[in-house]
């Protein structure tokens, strides 16, 4: 258990420092790279929790697909280092307030939930992942079928919307 | 955790890496000789017998070559990019089973580094990470040609990853597992390339695009981009890109062999003979498992698949970039979706009707869908043959 704890502490250090690096780097490409590292670290957290399926999906979807598209757009637009634009006047106080609220909530939950003896037990089936994968698929396509389909339609709408928007621009140029 | 387990992992990883590096060196020679043979030339045959020492000579040349770092590069990323390209091409091989197992000093030693039960997902995640090296090399070089190469490669690899994922899905469904070891075991009776020949074909095409090989080598098209993303790299850093490309070829051939061509297993018609990897050989009173046949079979399959890649490079011209994207999105993606559907339906029907012969409807329908796709391409090309795009 102690080795898990050490791994966890080191990982959290990496996760926090990459998140800070993402926030504070001047160059958008470096920000994106820090975010990739952060996603990979989170994937390792999932591995630590015994959820390899989610860990691998995290890497494939976030680090592999989405961040590559981010980088693609940043490079295509040449937007590596934009001049710091004027922030909206109410943005900074609002951000401070919201982050304080989030921190208070997190600390509150940490002290109320984490101290109770009913710690969350790791799922039994996680060692045999094909079984747990089957269970997950069953849950997803039986119990949560409607949300699943709604999500897919949402994504489809977003995709069609993006295509329609770019099409109009093309038609205007002709 | 026993320290011997760590030692075993370390040694297996080391052996695998060294094998891949040697494979890379000799693949360059293999490619140059084979290309030369196809183009009626001789190829490098001076260093050593049949040119066998040529890779070593090349390595010495590259190590002692001057390394230029252009003035305005983004230094950290510029230095990191070659490393980021090589590492995925090495670690992706960790889950590929090379054979069954043998006993040494009373321990059973399996011929794979890790048999993780989400092996196929591991492959997809590492393959998706592999884009970064090329993209960052293109960006950090601070050169428009390199940048265009990087952007092209990210667009191309993302587009073809979708079809690659669906080809993985077909193999997962046929093998009823995500572990590569179990997928190989499931091919004891019959290779998946026989049940799903179209899937194997699409997989081979997509892998050519994923490793940026001709005819999909847009990121480094010499005539347009002066070598693309690695235009600003020289010496050992260039050698790392070169190494990554050839290692990716080897590894992706191993994956193709594992998913569709029976992996380390023998040909399906040899399954109960003494040439099977499960066979027990007897020489006098001494009997042992024929585990060493596994790596040999895998090597044979990889060499054949690599020859396929070299052959394609020698004979086919590069595809125009817009056609490359159109081919990926409008032909390969619908086709592989259809193949995944046909496979799933075939497996389900065979289960429901209790008739294993229904499985053979899958290859028939798949081949028909490939023919339909080819007919569509043909019609499209004919219509456009006189106009641009």
Image (cartoon, coloured by chain):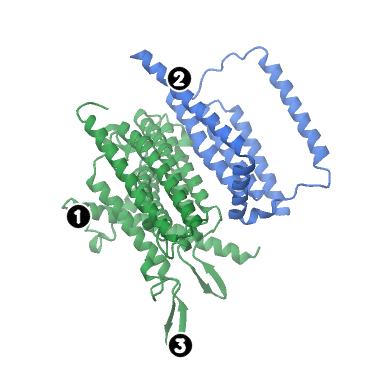
Chain colours: A blue, B green
Q: Is residue B162 visible?
A: yes
> Mark 2 highlights which residue?
A165
Horizontal and vertical percent position of residue A100: 75, 25
Q: Is residue B62 above or below residue B2?
A: above
Horizontal and vertical percent position of residue B373: 32, 41
Look at the numbered discs 2 and 3 and tell me whether their residues touch, using CB distance below 8 Å: no
Pinpoint the chain carrying mark 3: B
Q: Residue at x 38, y 66 (%)?
A: B268
Classify the position of the N terminus of chain A by image quarter.
Answer: bottom right
Look at the numbered discs 2 and 1 and tell me whether their residues touch, using CB distance below 8 Å: no
Marks 2, 1: nearer the viewer = 2
What number is the disc on residue B285?
3
Q: Is residue B95 visible?
A: no
Looking at the image, which is closer to me, A100 or B233? A100
How many tags in the picture?
Answer: 3
Pinpoint the chain carrying mark 1: B
Look at the numbered discs 1 and 3 and tell me whether their residues touch, using CB distance below 8 Å: no
Horizontal and vertical percent position of residue A36: 55, 37
Q: CA distance from mark 2 to mark 3?
A: 77 Å
B291 with respect to B149 (left or right): right
Q: CA distance from mark 1 to mark 3?
A: 47 Å
Occupied quadrant, residue A89? top right
Q: Residues within 10 Å of mark 2 (few under 14, many from 20)?
A: few
Dot placed on the residue nearer the N-terminal end, 1 or 3: 1
Pinpoint the chain carrying mark 2: A
Q: Secondary structure at mark 3?
A: loop
Q: Secondary structure at mark 2?
A: helix
Q: Residue at x 28, y 34 (%)?
A: B320
> Mark 1 highlights which residue?
B37
Looking at the image, which is closer to me, B277 or B167? B167
Residue extending furthest front?
B353
């Amino acid at each position: 258990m102690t080795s898990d704890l050490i791994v966890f502490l080191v990982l959290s250090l990496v996760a926090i420092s990459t998140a800070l690096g993402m926030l504070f780097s001047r160059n958008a490409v470096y920000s994106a790279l820090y975010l990739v590292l952060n996603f990979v670290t989170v994937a390792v957290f999932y591995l630590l929790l015994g959820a390899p399926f989610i860990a691998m999906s995290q890497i494939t979807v976030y680090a592999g697909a989405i961040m590559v598209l981010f980088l693609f757009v940043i490079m295509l637009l040449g937007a590596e280092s934009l001049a710091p634009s004027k922030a909206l006047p109410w943005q900074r106080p609002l951000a401070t307030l919201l982050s304080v609220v989030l921190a208070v909530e997190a600390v509150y939950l940490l002290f109320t939930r984490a101290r109770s003896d009913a710690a969350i037990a790791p799922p039994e089936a996680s060692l045999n992942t094909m079984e747990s994968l089957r269970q997950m698929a069953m849950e997803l396509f039986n119990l949560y079928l409607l949300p699943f389909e709604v999500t897919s339609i949402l994504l489809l709408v977003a995709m069609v919307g993006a295509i329609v928007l770019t099409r109009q621009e093309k038609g205007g140029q002709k | 955790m026993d320290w011997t387990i760590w030692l075993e992992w370390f040694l297996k990883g080391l052996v695998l890496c060294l094998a891949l590096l040697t494979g890379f060196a000799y693949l360059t020679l293999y490619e140059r000789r084979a290309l030369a043979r196809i183009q009626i030339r001789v190829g490098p045959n001076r260093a050593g017998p049949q040119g066998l020492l040529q890779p070593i000579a090349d390595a010495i040349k590259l190590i002692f070559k001057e390394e230029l770092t252009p003035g305005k590069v983004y230094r950290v990323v510029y230095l990191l990019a070659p490393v980021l390209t090589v590492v995925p091409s090495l670690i992706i091989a960790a889950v590929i089973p090379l054979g069954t197992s043998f006993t040494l000093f009373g321990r059973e030693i399996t011929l794979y580094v890790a048999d993780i039960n989400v092996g196929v997902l591991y492959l997809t995640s590492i393959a998706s990470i592999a884009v970064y090296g090329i993209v960052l090399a293109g960006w950090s070089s601070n050169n428009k040609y390199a940048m265009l190469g990087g952007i092209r490669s990210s667009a191309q690899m993302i587009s073809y990853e979708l079809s690659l994922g669906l080809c993985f899905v077909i193999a997962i469904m046929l093998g009823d597992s995500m572990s590569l070891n179990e997928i190989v075991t499931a091919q004891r009776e019959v290779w998946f390339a026989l049940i799903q020949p179209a899937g194997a074909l699409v997989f081979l095409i997509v892998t050519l695009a994923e490793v940026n090989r001709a005819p999909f080598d847009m990121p480094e098209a010499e005539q347009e981009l002066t070598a693309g993303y690695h235009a600003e790299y020289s010496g050992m850093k260039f050698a790392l890109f070169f190494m990554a490309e050839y290692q990716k070829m080897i590894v992706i051939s191993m994956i193709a062999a594992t998913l569709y061509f029976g992996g380390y297993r023998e040909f399906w018609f040899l399954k109960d003979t003494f040439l099977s990897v499960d066979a027990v050989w007897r020489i006098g009173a001494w009997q042992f498992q024929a585990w060493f046949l596994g790596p040999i079979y895998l090597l044979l399959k990889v060499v054949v698949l690599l020859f396929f890649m070299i052959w394609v490079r020698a004979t086919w011209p590069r595809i125009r970039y817009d056609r490359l994207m159109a081919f990926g999105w409008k032909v390969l993606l619908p086709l592989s979706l259809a193949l995944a559907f046909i496979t799933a339906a075939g497996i389900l029907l065979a289960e429901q009707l209790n008739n294993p012969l229904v499985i053979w409807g899958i290859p028939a329908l798949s081949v028909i869908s490939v023919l339909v796709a080819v007919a569509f391409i043909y019609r499209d090309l004919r219509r456009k043959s006189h106009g641009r795009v």
